[in-house]
């Protein structure tokens, strides 16, 4: 069958024609949306107990004294130590900057000032 036998894609001024492919795609989209909506409501209803209810998206409350809470507390000790080290290094670098600036302005080894 050649191109001359195929109907044109669209006729100006005529209402759009419904094709089988468009009907199949629209039906699949509607079925997918309905399935995802029912699955989402079912999963929320199943997991919405008071101890695990989410207050913010992506954040889950953890019971005090649980294994997960203990692990998080141990990890936060390392985070605090790392932040202290970062602050010490920043202070040392800032002090070195001040010392170099003073030495170059007082001694003026390159004759800039």
Image (cartoon, rainbow, N blue to C red):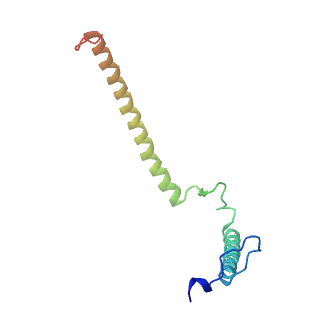
Residue 7 image-quadrant placement:
bottom right
Q: Residue at x 34, y 28 (%)?
A: 93
Camera-nearest residue between 100 and 43: 100
**Image quadrant containing the C terminus:** top left
Camera-nearest residue between 43 and 31: 31
Please, is residue 94 above or below residue 3 in the view?
above
Residue 43 coordinates in the image, percent (x, y): 66, 71
Residue 21 coordinates in the image, percent (x, y): 65, 82
Residue 27 image-quadrant placement:
bottom right
Residue 41 coordinates in the image, percent (x, y): 71, 70
Please, is residue 60 above or below residue 31 in the view?
above
Please, is residue 95 above or below residue 2 in the view?
above
Residue 54 image-quadrant placement:
bottom right
Please, is residue 22 above or below residue 112 in the view?
below
Marks counted in the figure total 0
Camera-nearest residue between 36 and 72: 36
Left or right of 100? Residue 8 is right
Residue ranking furthest to the front: 4
**Image quadrant containing the N terminus:** bottom right
Residue ranking furthest to the left: 109
Camera-nearest residue between 46 and 14: 14
Q: Residue at x 66, y 68 (%)?
A: 47
Residue 70 coordinates in the image, percent (x, y): 50, 55
């Amino acid at each position: 069958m050649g191109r001359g036998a195929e109907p044109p894609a669209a006729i100006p001024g005529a209402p759009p024609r419904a094709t089988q492919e468009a009907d199949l795609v629209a039906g699949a989209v509607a079925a997918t949306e309905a399935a995802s909506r029912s699955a989402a409501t079912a999963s929320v209803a199943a997991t919405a107990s008071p101890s695990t209810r989410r207050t913010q998206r992506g954040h889950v409350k953890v019971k005090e004294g649980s294994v997960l809470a203990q692990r998080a507390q141990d990890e936060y000790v390392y985070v605090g130590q790392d932040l202290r080290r970062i602050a010490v290094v920043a202070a040392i670098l800032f002090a070195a900057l001040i010392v170099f600036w003073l030495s170059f302005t007082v001694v003026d080894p390159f004759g800039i000032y």
